Image (cartoon, grey):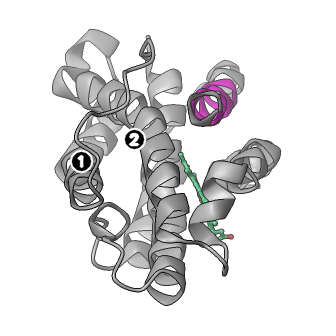
Amino acid sequence: MELSERLKKETRSAHQALDQHPMLRSLVARSSTIDQYRLGLQAMYRAWKPLESAVENSLKDISRFQPTPEQTSFLAFCDANFKPRRHALVDDLRVLGVTSLPSDRAGFGFVDVPQLLGGLYVFFGAQLGSRVIAASVTENVPGAPTGFFTATHQNVTDFWKQFRIQLDDLPLDQTEIPSLFQSATMAFEEFRKALD
Ligand code: HEM
């Protein structure tokens, strides 16, 4: 089984804990109201900011991870495709009348390449869910601002395909794989904790 497929399998329950979390469920519920959407978006901000910052800080200076040449080119691909979305989230919150942003939780970071790969998987994969949420909000809460959920790649499916192909092609030491799985699971868990 390819690495990306194993990663999906290993993190399935961590993802489920997120997409079944009441705060995120309320974003996609048919009965969602603008007040619920505002609350969900505030929770999203608390969770998204530390993940995005961890990824951004790591990509800023990849040399400290001492990546191999193949890893360097994958990380360059990620860096080229990195687009911060927290500003769009803040703009959406402002439109909804939120002027004071939720306070930050203690952040987290990655210390080596396998850990960073796990975080990148969660960060970039989140675009798939975002598209689902955007479509649902547009239908269920007409007029609600969806700048954050639509600030993804134009063609998320294509991007995700490329991301997976490149990840699967990376030569990784077998001993590094458990750390990658653990890091992706941790990124999902940190996200879930921040929603509470
Ligand atoms: C209500 C919230 C969410 C919904 C409804 C949702 C839904 C989805 C859907 C439909 C997919 C595509 C599954 C597939 O192609 O088989 C997906 C994939 C994914 N989502 Fe979510 N998602 C949500 C939240 C999140 C969040 C907040 C994150 C990250 C912080 C996230 C991370 C991922 C990742 C990494 C994948 C890729 C799975 C893979 O194909 O390997 N999701 N999500």
Residue 49 against residue 84 in the figure, above or below: above
- For the point 69% across and 46% down, the residue is 7
Q: CA distance from mark 1 to mark 2?
A: 8 Å
Of the pair 193 and 157, the residue shown nearer to us: 193
| Residue 99 appears in the rendering | yes
Label 1 is placed on what type of residue? Val
Please state the extent of the stretch shown in magenta in the rendering: 180-192
Q: Which residue is mark 2?
A: 45
Mark 1–mark 2 contact, CB under 8 Å?
yes
Please provide percent x and percent y for residue 128. Answer: 51, 67
Residue 62: within the magenta?
Answer: no
Disc ID at residue 90: 1
Residue 169 in sight = no
Using the image as rendered, state which of residue 143 and residue 116 is in the foreground: 143
Q: Residue 140, position in %: x, y? A: 54, 84
Q: Amino acid at mark 2?
A: Tyr
Q: Give percent across and percent down for residue 49.
A: 36, 34
User: Ligand 1 closer than 8 Å to the CB at disc 2?
Assistant: no
User: Helix or strand or loop: what does disc 1 sit on?
Assistant: helix
Which image quarter is the N terminus in? bottom right
